Amino acid sequence: MSDNASRKILVLGGSRGIGAALVRRFAGAGDHVVFSYAGSADAAAALAAETGARAVRVDSADRDALVAAVAAEGPVDVLLVNAGTLALGDPLTLDADAVDHMIDVNVRAPYHAAVEAARTMPGDGRILVIGSTNGDRMPFAGGAAYAMTKSAIQGMVRGLARDLGGRGITVNAIQPGPTDTDMNPASGPMAETMHGFMAIKRHVHASEIADYAAFLASPSAAMITGSMQTIDGGFGA
Ligand code: NDP
């Protein structure tokens, strides 16, 4: 993988938040970026116009559509699986369908997308999945199912790193802590509680996640694989 060559990058869930920061970062570096979205058509169109990236509507919860889309975009040099949902609440009353939908998007989709991308990915390719520091630490009530989905990513990353390492493909998770997006606004009602768990008491900026993803996707990170890269201001310390 050359530093200067224009690579094909596929961002799953790129219309808003961390995903949009990933699109901006890679497109800004001259890569050829395609990103998916589900519900935010206007935001996706605006981001495509801003960055020159191409937006495709694909619901990550629809496995057949997702796999077909990944196959159609292949071969990709870098797969960034960012799409995720958050269902928090008392497990005794939390809507079971919302939990299952979260499992579809946060767990099933990353696995099937990564496997499909790997079929045609070149030998120095990169698979990066956005996990969460909650995969390691769940310090408040109501997050069992969400934490479960992010811990599942850890097992997948370790296993796929073994499966694909012989081809020089690296597979890693980035585990953000509280990051300022629609999902978890820095001005939201949970912010103070979140900062209470952190050594550096502010939300992560989505651009900080994107900068680190760019490094992990670079040739310099060729020997980083099967790992969880945590960016959480000490949330899990
Ligand atoms: P946002 O809710 O701000 O954005 C979510 C993005 O994922 C949107 O672009 C959305 O697209 C896309 N998406 C959601 N569901 C689907 C779907 N079914 N199919 C395709 N795309 C989908 O979330 P964040 O940016 O905050 O989160 C991004 C990732 O980072 C998630 O995996 C999340 O779990 C993780 N994370 C976030 C943290 C935070 O504090 N913000 C902390 C730790 C991890 P659309 O709107 O078009 O549907």
Image (cartoon, rainbow, N blue to C red):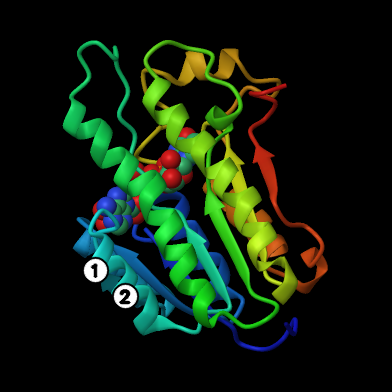
Tag 1's secondary structure? helix
Residue 104, above or below 150: below
Please identify the quarter of the rendering in which residue 89 is found.
Answer: top left
Q: Residue at x 24, y 68 (%)?
A: 65
Any part of residue 24 in sight = yes
Q: Residue at x 62, y 52 (%)?
A: 159
Quarter the N terminus occupies: bottom right
Q: Nearer the viewer, residue 11 or 192?
A: 11
Residue 44 is marked as: none
Q: Residue at x 75, y 81 (%)?
A: 3
Residue 160, above or below 54: above
Judging by the rendered image, the residue that carries numbered circle 2 is 69
Percent of width and height locating residue 81: 47, 58
Amino acid at dot 1: Ala
Residue 65 is marked as: 1
Q: Nearer the viewer, residue 141 or 14?
A: 141
Quarter the C terminus occupies: top right
Percent of width and height locating residue 184: 40, 32
Compared across the picture, whether 190 is left or right of 169 comes to left
Cα gap from disc 2 to disc 1, whole angstroms: 6 Å
Number of disc labels: 2
